[in-house]
Image: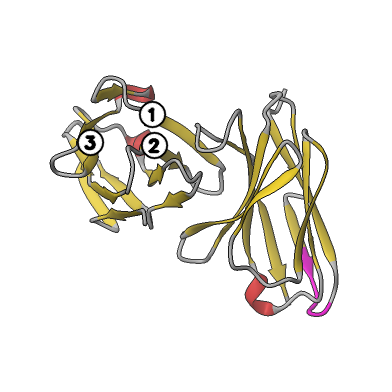
Amino acid sequence: AQSVTQLDSHVSVSEGTPVLLRCNYSSSYSPSLFWYVQHPNKGLQLLLKYTSAATLVKGINGFEAEFKKSETSFHLTKPSAHMSDAAEYFCVVSDRDDKIIFGKGTRLHILP
Amino acid sequence: DTAVSQTPKYLVTQMGNDKSIKCEQNLGHDTMYWYKQDSKKFLKIMFSYNNKELIINETVPNRFSPKSPDKAHLNLHINSLELGDSAVYFCASSQEPSTEAFFGQGTRLTVV
């Protein structure tokens, strides 16, 4: 059975400092992994995806994530936070059974 | 042009009513989904259709019935609405199951 755990429900960082949003997964097969962002009262937007190609995945808005099979992790990072990054972030896993599981989300707060 | 569009954006209705939410995608995707996002922002897949056929049907009350007249549309009909049905419902589509999904803006359903 697959699952995804976002380790922090809230993360606060100061503007201009690095962002780290943590995600761990479990999957019976080689999973596909995604990060989505949801701004207040908006739909979800894909930030980046991992589908068994390069383990370091670059996404939009300066975000990237590294797939680490040994740690079953897919943490999302950004070198320097902007105020516009304040949003809810979801880690998502899917595998051969076409099951799609969302993490519970991490609310990112950016402090001025 | 909006890739995935859902209507209405807001829906307020009384308990016991029957309502429908429509979803259309113009991306030529084969797979469409309905997700429910509760008040704690937790997203859970409800249904998935691939080429008009149901492929995922999570444990939801049978008061919820998806209908896919063609590949570009997946409507959600809800009978006998209950207070607990209040949530934001998201439609999404992807080229194949388990690939990146494109989301609609959501429909905020409030049952009073």
Q: Chain of mark 1?
A: A
Q: Which residues are magenta?
A: B12-16
Residue sitting at 46 percent across and 60 percent down? B42
The image shows residue B65, relative to residue A24, as above or below, that is: below
Mark 1 crowdedness (10 Å alpha carbons): few <14, some 14-19, many ≥20? some
Q: Which residue is mark 2?
A: A34
Residue A100 in picture, x, y percent from top left: 48, 48
Looking at the rendered structure, the secondary structure element under dot 3 is loop
Residue B60 in picture, x, y percent from top left: 63, 68
Looking at the rendered structure, the secondary structure element under dot 1 is strand
Q: Are marks 3 and 2 on the same chain?
A: yes
Q: Chain of mark 3?
A: A
Residue B29 in picture, x, y percent from top left: 67, 28
User: Type of residue at label 2?
Assistant: Phe
Residue sitting at 72 percent across and 78 percent down? B82
Q: Quadrant of residue A37?
A: top left
Residue sitting at 24 percent across and 56 percent down? A8
Q: Are marks 2 and 1 on the same chain?
A: yes
Q: Which residue is mark 3?
A: A15
